Image: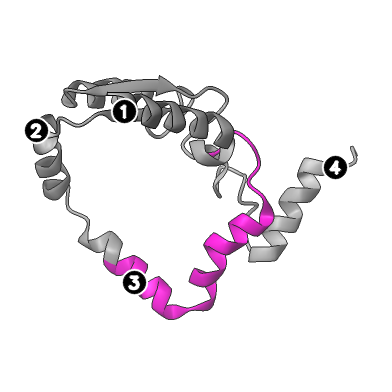
Amino acid sequence: MARPGPRSADRRDTADAIGGNPPHSALGFGLLAEHPIPAETLAGWVRPALADPAVRRDARKLLRGISKRQTLQAAERLPGFERPTLLAWAPADRFFRFSFAERLLERFPNGRLQRIEDARTFVSLDQPERLAELIEEFLREGAER
């Protein structure tokens, strides 16, 4: 039997910390991030729901209240938003495909789409420096206008 590497140990430690499946597995948050999410970050996301029934109640209430109708109504108003808009998107995102970003870009009259490689849904965790660079560049260009 092969000895587990550091990544396997990290997964077990994280699972032990919050109780349950290793969060970087497909059953946890693994499909959302290209790189392992630190155990303390995951614990900060998960522990409140495990420990506090009020948090679970609020989450259920939020999820039950989400309406496709509201989302579609908001999407219809996007072309009226004429301010500069930056979409920073990961082509490897498995949940929000890059084609979704391209379609969304069509809705913004003054939009720009930037690819963030080596990332998935949680772009800000996978590539925080690259995302910060893109935001800084976007804001600098806006200030120069």
Region of the chain picked out in magenta, as a range = 32-61
Residue that badge 2 annotates: 80
Pick whichever of labels 1 and 4 is earlier in the sequence: 4
Bin the neighbour count of mark 1 within 10 Å (Cα to Cα): few under 14, some 14-19, many 20 and up: few
Q: Quadrant of residue 7?
A: top right
Near mark 2 (Cα within 10 A), the count class, few <14, some 14-19 or many ≥20, is few
Q: Amino acid at mark 4?
A: Pro
Asked if the stretch drawn in magenta spans residue 54, the answer is yes
The answer to whether residue 32 is seen in the rendering is no
Question: Does the segment drawn in magenta span residue 33?
Answer: yes
- Image height of 8 relative to 109, above or below: below
Question: Which amino acid lies under the numbered mark 1 shown in the image of this protein?
Answer: Gly
- Measure the alpha-carbon separation of dots 1 and 2: 19 Å
The residue under label 1 is: 142
From the image, state whether disc 3 or disc 2 is nearer to you: 2
> What number is the disc on residue 58?
3
Q: Position of residue 6 (x, y in %)?
A: 83, 42
Q: Amino acid at mark 2?
A: Gly
Residue 115 percent location from the top left of the image: 44, 21
Quick check: 17 left or right of 144?
A: right
Residue receiving disc 4: 4
SS under mark 1: helix
Helix, strand or loop status at disc 2? helix
Residue at the outermost front position: 144
Question: Which residue is at the front of the view, 101 or 86?
Answer: 86
Name the residue: 53% across, 22% down.
117
